[in-house]
Amino acid sequence: TNIIGYGNEYPFNEAVTYDISCAALDNTHFVVGFSDGGDNEYGKCMIGTISDTNIIGYGNEYPFNEAVTYYVSCAALDATHFVVGYEDVGGDNYGIAMIGTRSEYIPVGLENKSANMGSKMVAAGLI
């Protein structure tokens, strides 16, 4: 039989939260991207760290879009880089992709707008 067990819950945003997406960066770190309903639906990312006792801790919230953000999707590129895709509702509904860097000083960067002016769904994943 197949059985799934779950550990404890570790909230990363204690407000209404939309469009949550996670991606593993390595065996102890992951990125979580989301639309923060408690902060004008801004798009944000955080780095989560899993301890050796399976406790999750989070770093600071880093906004990647300070406007209404929908359809957040994250995918890992390697242990320190990830891509976050989203619909920039505050920017003509463009589909946006950005590269994020996990470091002490540079959470996200390199914005590129897609050619699709009316994106309704954005998904990021590695094949």
Image (spheres, rainbow, N blue to C red):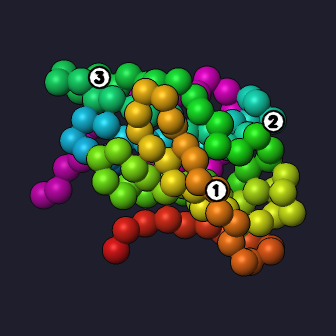
Callout 2: few (<14), some (14-19), or many (20+) C-alpha neighbours within 10 Å? few
Mark 3, secondary structure of its residue: loop
- To which quarter of the image does residue 92 belong? bottom right
Count of picture labels: 3
In this figure, which residue is indicated by the disc labeled 2? 40
In this figure, which residue is indicated by the disc labeled 3? 55
In this figure, which residue is indicated by the disc labeled 1? 111
> Quick check: marks 1 and 3 in contact, CB under 8 Å?
no
Callout 1: few (<14), some (14-19), or many (20+) C-alpha neighbours within 10 Å? some
Q: What amino acid type is highlighted by mark number 3?
A: Ile
On screen, 56 above or below 30? above
Task: Report the mark closest to the observer, 1 or 3.
Answer: 1
On screen, 39 above or below 88? above
Please provide percent x and percent y for residue 3.
19, 50
On screen, residue 91 versus residue 76, left or right, reads right
Q: Residue furthest left?
A: 1
- Residue 120 visible in the current orientation: no
> Quick check: marks 2 and 1 in contact, CB under 8 Å?
no
Q: CA distance from mark 3 to mark 2?
A: 29 Å
Q: CA distance from mark 1 to mark 3?
A: 33 Å
Q: Residue at x 36, y 58 (%)?
A: 77
Q: Which residues are magenta?
A: 1-22
Of helix, strand and loop, which mostly describes the magenta segment? Answer: loop
Mark 1, secondary structure of its residue: strand
Please provide percent x and percent y for residue 81.
40, 50
Please provide percent x and percent y for residue 44.
62, 39
Q: Residue at x 77, y 66 (%)?
A: 94
Q: CA distance from mark 2 to mark 1?
A: 20 Å
- To which quarter of the image does residue 64 belong? top right
